[in-house]
Image: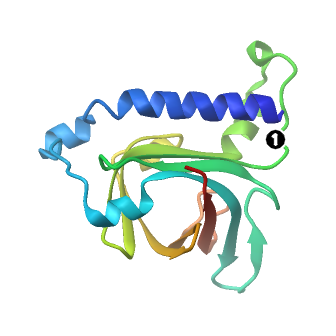
Amino acid sequence: MKTILGMVALGVFAVGAVFAEFPSPMALRAGAAKLTPAPANEQLAGTWRLVRFTRTNVATGEAQDTFGKAPSGFIQFGGDGRMMMLVVKEQRAAPPEPEKMTEQQRADLFKTMIAYAGTYTFDGKALICHLDVTWNQAWTGTDIVRHVTLEGSKLILTADAHKSYVDGNVISAVMVFEKVL
């Protein structure tokens, strides 16, 4: 399973490298194709591995691990202002033959991942991702804001309270990453 996840991660990063060379349709429409690296972006530049993903139900204060105690994932920031993220639940069920997956198996895999890419801006505190492509089409073309804390080799992204796409509860979420490259 780790080999397959490693191959998927390499594939995602390879695709990201290819797309990093092309401005997004949104960037072209907005005239933002002339992105220039900012000093704050240099703090984020590189690849980060997910080590923790938690969410807190705002109404009850109950905290839980999102996607289990050991989810897998990466977030990558380029000095050119492009980013991509892929996160999956721990121990996702692998269908025995991908070409024979049932609709339920497809739905279960979809519900146990997050993936998006686009451009980003970072002012040293707030990260704004301008999403060009997402696993959840409702997010494509939107901006998401995360509050950033950098602690040595750790990157902590905190989301403001929002309605969860998983269960509809109002939650806040925290993702902790460690620097890989």
**Residue drawn at 82 percent across, 62 percent down:** 69
Quadrant assignment, res 12: top right
Give the image location of residue 109, x and y in percent. 72, 37
Name the foreground residue: 56 vs 177.
Answer: 177
Give the image location of residue 33, x and y in percent. 17, 41
**Residue drawn at 85 percent across, 44 percent down:** 91
Q: Residue furthest left?
A: 31
Taking the image as shown, residue 60 lies to the left or right of residue 136, namely: right
Task: Estimate how packed mark 1 is, as few (under 14), some (14 to 19) or many (20 or more) residues with alpha carbons within 10 Å.
Answer: some
* Residue to which mark 1 is pinned: 92
Q: Quadrant of the N terminus?
A: top right
Q: Residue furthest top?
A: 99
Instruction: Answer whether residue 32 is visible to the viewer in this image.
Output: yes
**Residue drawn at 35 percent across, 53 percent down:** 142
**Can you say whether 136 is above or below 175 in the image?**
above
Instruction: Answer whether residue 160 is visible to the viewer in this image.
Output: no
**Residue drawn at 59 percent across, 67 percent down:** 153
